[in-house]
Image (tube, grey):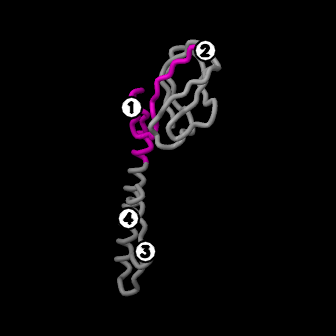
């Protein structure tokens, strides 16, 4: 995406050339408007098609789906992940019953530390 935007940004000499007639400048401005429309259409498509995956894999969101099973509420569960960065949030859950899962302490680049507020809670969560 950065390359698309970089290609769009013209230099001043691309826009204004004192030796060229006004029509050439108009053509360049129209070309820039056309390229801007293409960039905006690309951005719109990207934002409107964000997918989190089906629970077994992540799509275009940098996240991991992780299976969890809590037998007792309030007992810490340590899990591993492959984000190669410390996760910032739990954004997706597929749980077998009502309940909450939360970070019990700061995650690392390879491990997460979770607790549940409900006994016998299991399912899948996505960390990002």
The correct choice, above or below, for 24 with respect to 84 in the image is: below
Q: Are marks 2 and 1 in contact (CB under 8 Å)?
A: no
Q: Nearer the viewer, residue 126 or 25?
A: 126
The Cα atoms of the two marked residues, 1 and 3, are separated by 42 Å
The Cα atoms of the two marked residues, 4 and 2, are separated by 55 Å
* Of callouts 1 and 3, the N-terminal one: 3
The Cα atoms of the two marked residues, 4 and 3, are separated by 10 Å
Task: Reply yes or no: does residue 70 show up in magenta.
Answer: yes
Which quarter shows the N terminus?
bottom left
Q: Residue at x 37, y 71 (%)?
A: 28
Q: Nearer the viewer, residue 45 or 97?
A: 97
Which-is-in-front pick, marks 4 and 2?
2
Residue at which label 4 appears: 7
Residue at which label 1 appears: 57
* Of callouts 4 and 2, the N-terminal one: 4
Secondary structure beneath disc 4?
Answer: helix
Q: Are marks 4 and 3 in contact (CB under 8 Å)?
A: no
Label 2 crowding class (10 Å Cα cut-off): few <14, some 14-19, many 20+? some
Q: Position of residue 72 (x, y in %)?
A: 60, 14
Q: Position of residue 9 (x, y in %)?
A: 43, 67
Q: Magenta segment range?
A: 44-72
Q: Are marks 4 and 2 in contact (CB under 8 Å)?
A: no
Q: In the picture provided, is 72 more to the left or to the right than 83?
A: right
Q: Position of residue 69 (x, y in %)?
A: 51, 18
Q: Residue at x 61, y 21 (%)?
A: 116
């Amino acid at each position: 995406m950065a390359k698309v935007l970089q290609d769009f940004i013209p230099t001043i000499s691309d826009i204004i050339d004192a030796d060229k007639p006004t029509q050439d400048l108009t053509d360049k401005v129209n070309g820039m408007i056309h390229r801007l429309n293409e960039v905006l259409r690309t951005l719109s498509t990207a934002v409107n098609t964000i997918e989190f995956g089906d629970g077994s894999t992540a799509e275009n969101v940098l996240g991991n789906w992780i299976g969890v099973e809590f037998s007792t509420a309030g007992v810490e569960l340590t899990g591993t992940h492959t984000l190669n960065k410390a996760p910032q949030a739990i954004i997706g859950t597929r749980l077998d019953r009502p309940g909450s899962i939360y970070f019990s302490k700061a995650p690392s680049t390879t491990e997460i530390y979770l607790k549940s507020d409900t006994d016998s809670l299991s399912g899948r969560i996505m960390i990002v």
